């Protein structure tokens, strides 16, 4: 069993370069292809669940993070403020800072115009960048980085809608995680601990904790309570996973927040025409793309399900005489929406081994008989070989497995 750092290097998923800096991985073409497929799937699942997607800038004025409370809580974990005025004070509220989270920007999306109770819940989603000034000695691989690509969303709803929204998030996790090929290792109800480093009233915290606890009970999942692990603005449900070394980390999360809507003075017009304060539900279905990819590499040991494998179909002619047929089939595969590669260099045995080492789910071999008949012989990653079949049938088989998001290739 290999850890994600070795697999990421062997399979050319990502690259770390000292010229760029620690904790700032480069996503190489193979990693970018897998990531794009996952993002596309998650984004579509969110759209079907009623989420609206936005883009927001990865920085904002210092005063916004002061308002949100992030500056007071995370100042040591944020990169220094940037100012175009060399003489500006270090605490200049106009100076720009890289964001440590996306929630203040999404609060601005909700507050960009007046809202009615009829619109609620308003579900805002984004795959956005955020940045943490981690010490160079603690970053490593994809599991702990400085530049984070977060699958994030914020739901603005009334108090009586919170329970249903949390249940929707848990249901989405139960649907999306198996499609990616893994299950949660545990659920944790992260509660407030001792001390005054939390926003909001005791009553709001008690109400938020009760809503999350009830959602977990209703979902029928076992969970443990963890005092002191809450976010500074509210309690949360953390969906935990373990790496090869047994280290536990949070992959997905859902949080109930009464404090941010108050700090940003968010409101909507209620049924009686009076202003009402929404509740803010923070959620991430798959967490950051970096930590997710680290986990998936280890779970599958690089042999990703066909639907998000970097190369889904490798095409290998037996000899030069079949090159034209191989090119034709590979072109058809690309036009059918598959990620296909054409393998021409070296002996057939070498090309078959290379496809196996790259964990390609399907290999199409074209010899003289297949070329003459307009057919291919498919070899599956698990060693099975299928009898020759017409191009269209082979593409339908591979395309069907991809469209169904099957965990394994299937004949």
Image (spheres, rainbow, N blue to C red):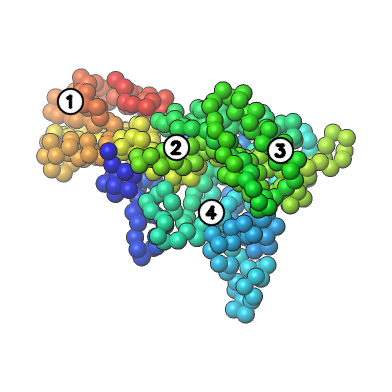
Residue designated by label 1: 370
Task: Write the residue at 45% across / 61% down.
Answer: 135
Q: CA distance from mark 2 to mark 1?
A: 46 Å
Tag 1's secondary structure? helix
Mark 2 vs mark 3: in front: 3
Q: CA distance from mark 4 to mark 2?
A: 22 Å
Residue designated by label 4: 130
- Which class describes the residues within 10 Å of circle 4: few (<14), some (14-19), or many (20+)? many
Residue 344 image offset from top left, x and y in percent: 18, 41
Residue designated by label 3: 206
State which quarter of the image contains the C terminus: top left
Q: CA distance from mark 2 to mark 3?
A: 27 Å
Task: Write the residue at 68% across / 43% down.
Answer: 257
Residue 410 image offset from top left, x and y in percent: 31, 22
First-in-chain label (1 vs 3): 3
First-in-chain label (2 vs 1): 2
Residue 66 image offset from top left, x and y in percent: 67, 60
Residue closest to the far bottom: 87
Mark 3 vs mark 4: in front: 3
Task: Judge by depth and name the residue closer to the eye, 228 or 259.
Answer: 228
Can you say whether 33 is above or below 220 in the image? below
Tag 4's secondary structure? strand
Q: Quadrant of residue 408?
A: top left
First-in-chain label (1 vs 4): 4
Residue designated by label 2: 241
User: What label sits on residue 354 in the rendered view?
Assistant: none
Q: Is residue 350 left or right of residue 262?
A: left
């Amino acid at each position: 069993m290999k850890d994600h750092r070795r697999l990421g290097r062997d399979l050319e998923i990502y690259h770390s370069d000292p010229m760029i800096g620690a904790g700032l991985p480069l996503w190489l073409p193979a990693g970018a292809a897998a990531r794009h497929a996952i993002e596309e799937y998650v984004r579509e699942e969110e759209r079907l669940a009623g989420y609206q997607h936005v883009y927001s800038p990865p920085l904002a004025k210092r005063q916004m993070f002061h308002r949100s409370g992030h500056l007071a809580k995370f100042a040591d974990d944020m990169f220094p403020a940037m100012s175009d005025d060399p003489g500006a004070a270090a605490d200049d509220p106009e100076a720009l800072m890289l964001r440590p989270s996306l929630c203040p920007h999404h609060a601005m999306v909700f507050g960009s115009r007046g809202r009615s109770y009829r619109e609620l819940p308003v579900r805002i989603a984004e795959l956005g960048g955020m940045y943490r000034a981690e010490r160079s000695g603690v970053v490593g691989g994809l599991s702990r980085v400085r530049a984070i690509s977060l699958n994030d969303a914020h739901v603005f709803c009334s108090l009586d809608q919170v329970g249903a929204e949390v249940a929707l998030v848990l249901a989405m996790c139960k649907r999306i995680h198996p499609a990616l090929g893994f299950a949660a290792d545990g659920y944790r109800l992260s509660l407030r601990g001792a001390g005054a480093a939390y926003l909001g009233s005791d009553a709001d915290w008690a109400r938020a904790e009760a809503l999350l606890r009830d959602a977990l009970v209703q979902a029928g999942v076992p969970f443990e309570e963890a005092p002191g692990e809450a976010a500074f603005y509210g309690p949360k449900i953390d969906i935990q996973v373990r790496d090869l070394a047994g280290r536990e980390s949070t992959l997905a999360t859902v949080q109930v927040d009464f404090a941010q809507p108050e700090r940003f003075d968010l409101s909507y017009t209620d049924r009686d025409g009076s202003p009402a304060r929404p509740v803010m539900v923070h959620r991430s279905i798959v967490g950051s793309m970096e930590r997710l990819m680290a986990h998936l590499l280890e779970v599958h040991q690089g042999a990703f399900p066909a639907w998000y494998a970097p190369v889904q179909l490798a095409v290998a002619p037996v000899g030069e005489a079949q090159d034209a047929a191989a090119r034709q089939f590979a072109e058809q595969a690309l036009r059918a929406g598959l990620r296909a590669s054409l393998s021409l260099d070296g002996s057939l045995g070498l090309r078959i081994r290379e496809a196996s080492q790259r964990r390609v789910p399907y290999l199409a071999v074209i010899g003289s008989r297949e070329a003459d008949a307009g057919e291919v012989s498919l070899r599956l990653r698990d060693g099975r070989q299928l009898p020759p079949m017409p191009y269209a049938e082979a593409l339908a088989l591979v395309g069907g497995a991809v469209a169904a998001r099957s965990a394994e290739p299937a004949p």
